[in-house]
Image: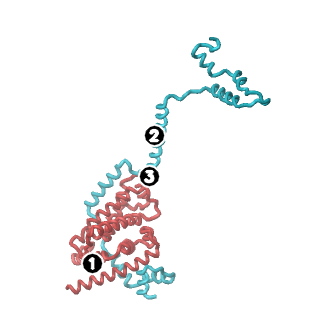
Chain colours: A cyan, B red
Amino acid sequence: MNKKELLERIERDERLSLVEQSELDAMLSKDDAQQDVARLLGGLPSEEPSLAWRSRLNERLQREASKPLRGFSWLRAGFIASATACILLAATVVFQVSRSGAVPSVSSELLVRWHEEAAASVALPADGSSMTTFAVAEQTPREEDELDDLLYGGSMEAL
Amino acid sequence: MTQHEAGNGLSDQLLIARCQADDLSAFDLLVDRYQARVFGFARRMVGDAQEAEDVAQEVFVRAFRNIRRYDGRASVAGWLFKIATNLCIDRRRRRSRRVVEVPLEPDADIAHGLIARSGDPQEEAVAKQMHEVVQSALATLSERLRPVLLLHDVEGMSYEEIANALNIPVGTVKSRLFLARERLQSALSAYLQAGETDE
């Protein structure tokens, strides 16, 4: 393949075979016209920016260095955002609970009693007689008794 | 100051490590080492000296901001030229959207910052004129071809370094370099022939 054909294929963005690629390598390093351009560009004089340019750059770099968020990363930003969200969520929950009033305090004994009463109320006697609710209820002090004691200093029956 | 003098023989990697430890003086040495290359590259990419200065400033500021992200996989030169290439292409696109023509004729400011090395006035004049001609010819190349040509033939970077800097395959680097040289030669021939007929 000659140089013109290779040039046309490259201009058309066609894929080169391995042979063509090696021909391209050879032309890049040995073709006179290619080398002339390379030499011409390689011999261009270097250019230095002015001292004023450097002074402005130094000022900008000093400003960048003094920025408080230097080294700020998205990872750190994500961590800070998550922590803030957690704190806000916790504060919201605490605020809501305190607004809705005091949480009713229920003693464990009371809970056990309520459970026993509920279980007894649905228990069916094996002999098919009436429900044993009363029997069970009589074994355990009723909630009303405690309330009566608080209100009247004794059982209602005593009154 | 030349790139070899800057940094007193410290390697790029050592300077980068010191920069990453917040040593601003190490970054100054890196700027000393690469400012001429980055400015020259930007100058040839965008054509306008003032714009090239802006680009070169932005390259170093962005490098400074992102110094901790530099992982050493690419050379420091490749990393800086990658930033510079993206900035130059971006600026040219924005400028073309504003419909401002790129001057193909050499202008009076074309030799901004140019330091002639010979000391001979006649040689300086010839070098300056050649520089202007080459700059005008470079301006005729597309954005795809120009950075490849400059990085290889002016900056002396390898195919692999260029491929890494421009995010293109090595084969594409070679194809573009071949095409760019051919087109630059055609542009130079046309330019020089036009100059001869004018005289």
In the image, taking residue A121 as reference, residue A38 lies left or right, namely: left
Classify mark 2: residues with Cα within 10 Å, few (<14), some (14-19) or many (20+): few
In the image, residue B7 lies at what x, y percent? 37, 60
Quadrant of the drawing holding the N terminus of chain B: bottom left
In the image, taking residue B182 as reference, residue A111 lies left or right, namely: right
Q: Secondary structure at mark 1?
A: helix
Direction left: furthest residue: B199
In the image, residue A41 lies at what x, y percent? 34, 76
- Residues at circles 1 and 2 in contact by the CB criterion of under 8 Å: no
Q: Secondary structure at mark 2?
A: helix
> In the image, are marks 1 and 2 on the same chain?
no
Q: Which residue is mark 2?
A: A88
In the image, taking residue B30 as reference, residue B49 lies left or right, namely: left
Q: Secondary structure at mark 3?
A: helix
The structure residue drawn at horizontal position 53% and vertical position 29%, both measured from the top left corner, is A103
Direction front: furthest residue: A129
Residue type beneath disc 1:
Val
